[in-house]
Image (cartoon, coloured by chain):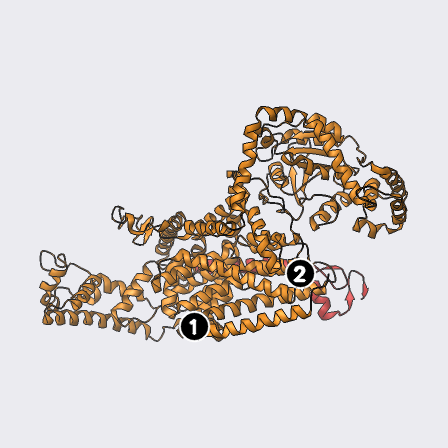
Amino acid sequence: MTAIEIVVMVLTISFVLSVFGVRIYKYLTHKMVDDCGCHKTNLKKWYYKTYKKGYCSCHNRNK
Amino acid sequence: MKRFALAGNPNSGKTTLFNMLTGSTEYVGNWPGVTVEKKVGTYKKLEEAVEIVDLPGIYSLSPYTPEEVIARQFIIEEKPDAVINIVDATNLERNLYLTTQLLEMDVPVIVALNMYDVVEKNGDLIDTDELSKALGVPVVSVSATKGTGIKKLMEVAYKELKNRRSAKTIVSALNINKLLTKLEKEYENKGISNPLFHAIKLAEYDELEIVQNSDLLEIVDEFKKTLSDEVFGDDIEAIIADDRYKYIQRECSIAYHHVVSLNEKEGSESEEKLSKSDKIDKVLTNKWVGIPIFLVILFLIFHLTFSENLFWFGNLFSDAAPSFEGTMFEGLFWTDGGINSPGVILFNFLGSLTDALSNLIASWLQNAPAWISGLVVDGICAGIFSVLSFVPQILFLFLFFSILEDSGYMARVAFILDRIFRKFGLSGRAFMPMIMGFGCSVPAMINARTLATDNEKTATIRVIPFFSCGAKQPILIVISAGICTVFNFPHKDLIVYLMYLVGIITAIVTIILMRNTTMRGKVPPFIMELPSYHMPKFKSLLIHMWDKLKHYVKKAFTIILASTIVIWFMQSFTWKFHFIEQADTMEITEEVFEGNFDDTTHTNDEVNASKSELLSLYSDAFDEEGNLAVDFGTLYNLYLEMLEDEGVDKEELQALESYCNKILTQANEEYKSIVNEDEYIDSSKSILASVGKVLTPIFTPLGFGLQLNRANGWIFPVSAVTGLIAKENVIATFAVLAQCTTTKATTFEDFKEIYEVNLTAESGDAAAVQMIKNTSATWAGLIAFIVFNMTTIPCFAAIATAKAELVSSKDDKLGKKRFRFTLLFWILTSYIASSMIYLSLEFVWPIAIFLILISIGVYLIYRYNKTHPLGE
């Protein structure tokens, strides 16, 4: 593989990853209202739903 | 930073002033209710920078609509340093009603008399000093569209910040002021800011106020018992409203003192001016011709944008017009079919530019590794250019829509459609977000917030995607152009127009269905102010168009580009990551057509045997030395003509036939040897093809599934699925995949087809033609494909917006349910609508079954509604 091919490949992959990455990042960090009324990012909501069922970080207690 | 809020009635020009002050390009329209959220910007021309907040248009500070709640909460809770009250000077009396309420807050108020230029043009004059005296706050005349008086307004507002203004009310009827004083003191004791405002709101039995301070309601109840007005009885809210209007009338007459005398001088002219707008309205909003006129205007817009036979002039000028054959203008302005519309001329022009550019890039990359030239030319260029080539037509369409909007006609359309909408279970107000849906579903869904009831809002959000947005236009244009070319149908504009109508009809049918089943409810009354007609401003038209273009181009270079790269990768590699090189059929076909095939000379005996016949058909077939001077394509066409000629010498014909067949066989052998080489990997082994083949059966009832050619049929389902990310992806996918759909050539006609299609393969149209021919799609299946794309999930951005709009409050379980159902609704509607259309158009007889099913459905709904009448 020549140097040019490697440069083109790296640039293309990083462009595609950044476009989809920005969107995924925005989705994960988008704040939504949780069941308990707190504003949480989608990522946090998913984390508590999966691993700490019933626990609310902003109330610092179980719901 | 100091903060100024812009408050005023709907369509009084707040956003225009906001854009002027902050240099923003926020959306403005000549109809009420464009702004539904507050918008923030900065004004930098004073001693210090000032933050400007544009609030939605409101008629009062009572919480009748969501906009009124937003504006009121902002002024009370976020306490701006001053409120600039934009007043439409041409409707002074009604606009000042809000002013009298703003005066009741402890905040500096500055009245900006907007559209003052129109007042002057009408020959009127408003005495700002006297009005200022009557209201007790500064009044400045401005024109937001022309930008006059704005600097003075901001200077006056900035000066006002130093004077601590305390609230004042003009309400004094029937000792209500005594009640207000008492309540004001109570609020002061409770430590609530803006006590006078709260006192008046409680006296008016304001819903929000009662919830917050119900303990003070007793005082109002007691006072109410002592009230007995001749007209309004003990209705305090009505008495206060009446008092406000009486005050405005009294004080306005002083300010209008000069107007009367001026009007007397130019009375007749002014009267004529007033009636002009009314005269136009008499026709455009007429009960019988209003809607037909609207439909004709819509058709004209589509005709001017998409037609290739402008005003059906057809062949009228075809003899007189130069054909520009062989130049860059060939086919730009007119073709055999007729004169091109302005939209098509620009489209062709941009298409030839992008073609030239991609050819140039391809020649640069001639010596580059195959995968790099494949990625750049077939992936990036094909994808991006196919999306960008539609920019002119999209801009044209938006230009026309903006003209209709800015002139004030769109507001009339909402008004004339209210009568029909009401029958379907919506108010005319729902028309605003729907018409915005023609631009983009995202702002349209946000605008649906202004609808009065949740059921109406949800139903409207669900049907907004059926109004084809800008991103869906390329699909419409490309597929309908493909249908016209392949199936010889001359009216592309008619197909586009009908497809728009199909979208609208789907919206109507589903609304009726929803409003009679899951979304039942009474239609709220529709009251809308009709703005006066005015000539659209060039600058605002440009802003509208730029707004759309910016959005479209940004998407093309981010998500669309990334998607095309992914699609190109998936179609260029197998699961084992082997790169798929396309069989170069184009090279072979070029060789065949240009006559240099495999060292065959054209002066052989077989051709010379038919020399006399060829010369009789085509005098330039041989040069002076007796050698064949035409390429193989022309020669073969001459042979075909000879076949139809009965008087032709049979022997000569046979000689030519054997020559033609020899060349074709040789070309075919060459082609097969490339295809059958061991290292050649067929594109049907690509990752995308294997994924596509899994999806294909799902789309069979829609006409673009298993019935398509097995080798290439997966392309339509794949395009439809990539379109769920963003609709521009559909055509970008076509353009990328067009490269891999070459059919195996066995006859001359096959070679000819590949040759002709490949000549223009980069533009979206040619890609679609190739796709249709190579997948053997039927026209019914193609129409169903358009309908599916038009009615299904519009894009990821629209899904996110719908979620934000439907799931509003913290424990909104109903909202979440509604959102999930909305997604299902889009998928089901598109699936059912397009399969119904495919089956009906392809086989006809299913229409009978559909009619029976629809009749049963209608009857069941009718019975249910009769047995379960709607409660109050």
As drawn, the label of residue B844 is 1
Query: Which residue corresponds to mark 2?
Result: B455
Question: What secondary structure is found at the residue carrying circle 2?
Answer: helix
Report x, y in % for residue B35. 63, 46
Q: Amino acid at mark 1?
A: Val
Give the tally of numbered discs: 2
Image quadrant in which the C terminus of chain B is located? bottom right
Q: Which residue is rendered at x = 77% and y = 45% of the image?
A: B77
Task: Please rate how many residues cluster around mark 1, counting C-alpha atoms within 10 Å: few if below 14, some from 14 to 19, many from 20.
Answer: few
Q: Residue at x 62, y 59 (%)?
A: B425
| Chain letter, disc 1 residue | B
The residue closer to the viewer here, B398 or B386, is: B398
Seen from the viewer's position, the closer of residues B762 and B418 is B418
Query: Is label 2 in contact with label 1 (beta carbons under 8 Å)?
Result: no
Q: Mark 2 packing: few (<14 Cα in 10 Å), some, or many (20+)?
A: many
In this view, the residue in front, B160 or B396, is: B396
Determine which quarter of the picture holds residue B258.
top right
- The Cα atoms of the two marked residues, 2 and 1, are separated by 37 Å
- Please tell me whether residue B692 is drawn above or below residue B98 in the rendered image: below
N-terminal of the pair, mark 2 or mark 1, is: 2
Residue B341, x across and y down, in percent: 38, 49
The color chain B is rendered in: orange
Q: Amino acid at mark 2?
A: Asn
Across and down, in percent, residue B413 comes to 55, 49
- Residue at point 35% right, 76% down? B678
Task: Decide if residue B269 is on the left or right side of residue B367.
Answer: right
| Colour chosen for chain A | red
Chain holding disc 2 = B
Q: Is residue B153 left or right of residue B410?
A: right
Q: Is residue B546 visible?
A: no
Tell me, for residue B258, which label it has, or none. Answer: none
